[in-house]
Image: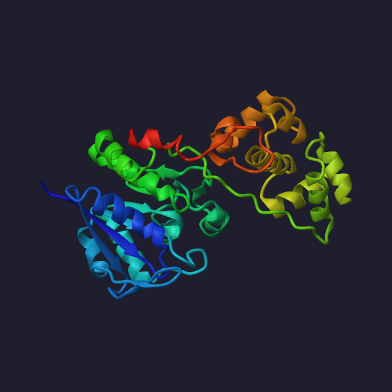
């Protein structure tokens, strides 16, 4: 049987886990189906983020016969442009029909090569704003674990590359092989691509202007019903000016931002307390448990109870409530 030819293109400061994922899933767990080679732009050793170097199998010429090209994430992806020979090699591979895949910030290389224009794509949630600003023709979605556009697939941050790799196995070889490999690596066989990345909300630092002060005022009153008119008065602006200034700073409406903060606070309470969903809904200003569940599932693709099960473990929890030891998830992958 002819093996599927796959090339993993290593950029300088490649992220160690990102490159390990395709090597482990395809080269180690399914070598009878895949021939996996590594390449660098010039064929020389590549620095790995955090230390050490990797010696690739060859240079860009390996891409000429690749049926799948995978670009793992790499440091400086949002600030540095890939050298033109590398971009040309990516374009050439795509034009002759190779499947193009990115893990984490590897999406930037595919975007710079012009391969993602007009597509919905994803990357690590913390870099989505940079990707969207640099490539306005893209629809950048920070939520999915991965996005499958047929011949082009992109994934979110770091471990979502495992989800994408298993997804490729299912596409290429069927669910039985993908499930077998998932069991081998102790991974749930399938987390759907639509499941949200678990995005950490950056803290809002106390500001020295009226808009930042209004944001701090809103955060201190999450449990209250706040109108845009109240926000604008706190910022000492007209409602229209407040809307415009707020959108310029946050890229969202004031009410959308406020909901985002309420969801972030809900996560904190689910992780670190034993409060009921009803109590949390009251504290974060979402009213009823049903309303909280609706908004929370829309933002995270998980029910609050499931989120607590997976991420809980902080102080102040009720006895046994939402406890997660890891063992509960293992049978799904290894039974």
Quarter of the image where one finds residue 268? top right
In-front residue for pair 215/161: 161
Residue 239, horizontal then vertical, whole percent: 83, 44
Q: Residue drawn 25% across and 34% down?
A: 176
Q: Is residue 87 above or below residue 298?
A: below
Image position of 318 with respect to 89: above or below: above
Q: Which one is nearer the viewer's eye here, 303 or 123?
A: 303
Which color mode does the image show? rainbow
Which residue is drawn at the image coordinates 42% and 69% (left, top)?
13
Q: Classify the position of the C terminus by image quarter.
A: top left
Q: Position of residue 289 (x, y in %)?
A: 68, 25
Residue at the extreme left of the image, as rendered: 1
Residue 97 appearing in the image: no
* Residue 118 placement (x, y as % from top left): 45, 48
Residue 157 in the image: state x and y as whole percent: 48, 52
Of 69 and 74, nearer the camera is 74
Q: Nearer the viewer, residue 254 or 309?
A: 309
Location of residue 170 (image quadrant): top left
147 lies above or below 51: above
- Residue 166 showing in the rendered view: yes
- In percent of the image, x 40 and y 69: which residue is there? 48
**Who's the residue at 40% across and 70% down the image?**
12
């Amino acid at each position: 049987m002819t093996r599927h030819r796959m090339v993993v293109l290593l950029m300088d400061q490649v992220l160690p886990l990102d490159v390990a994922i395709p090597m482990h899933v395809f080269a180690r767990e399914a070598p009878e189906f895949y021939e996996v080679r590594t390449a660098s732009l010039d064929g020389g050793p590549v620095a790995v983020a955090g230390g050490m170097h990797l010696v690739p199998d060859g240079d860009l010429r390996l891409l000429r016969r690749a049926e799948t090209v995978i670009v793992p994430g790499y440091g400086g992806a949002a600030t540095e442009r890939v050298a033109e020979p590398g971009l040309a090699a990516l374009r050439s591979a795509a034009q002759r029909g190779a499947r193009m895949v990115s893990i984490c910030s590897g999406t930037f290389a595919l975007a710079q090569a012009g391969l993602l224009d007009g597509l919905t794509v994803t990357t690590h949630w913390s870099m989505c704003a940079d990707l969207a600003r640099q490539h306005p023709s893209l629809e950048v979605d920070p939520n999915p674990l991965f996005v499958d556009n047929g011949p082009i697939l992109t994934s979110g941050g770091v471990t979502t590359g495992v989800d994408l790799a298993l997804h490729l196995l299912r596409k290429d070889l069927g669910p039985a092989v993908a499930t077998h490999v998932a069991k081998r690596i102790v991974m749930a066989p399938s987390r759907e691509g639509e499941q949200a990345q678990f995005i950490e909300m950056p803290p809002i630092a106390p500001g020295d202007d009226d808009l930042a002060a209004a944001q701090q005022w809103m955060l201190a009153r999450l449990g209250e019903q706040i109108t845009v008119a109240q926000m604008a008065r706190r910022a000492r602006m007209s409602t229209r000016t407040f809307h415009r200034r707020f959108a310029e700073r946050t890229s969202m409406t004031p009410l959308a931002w406020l909901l985002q903060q309420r969801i972030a606070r809900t996560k904190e309470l689910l992780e670190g307390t034993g409060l009921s969903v009803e109590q949390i809904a009251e504290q974060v200003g979402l009213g009823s448990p049903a309303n909280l569940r609706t908004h929370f599932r829309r933002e995270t693709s998980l029910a609050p109870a499931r989120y607590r099960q997976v991420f809980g473990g902080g102080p102040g929890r009720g006895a046994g409530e939402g406890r997660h030891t890891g063992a509960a998830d293992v049978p799904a992958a290894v039974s």
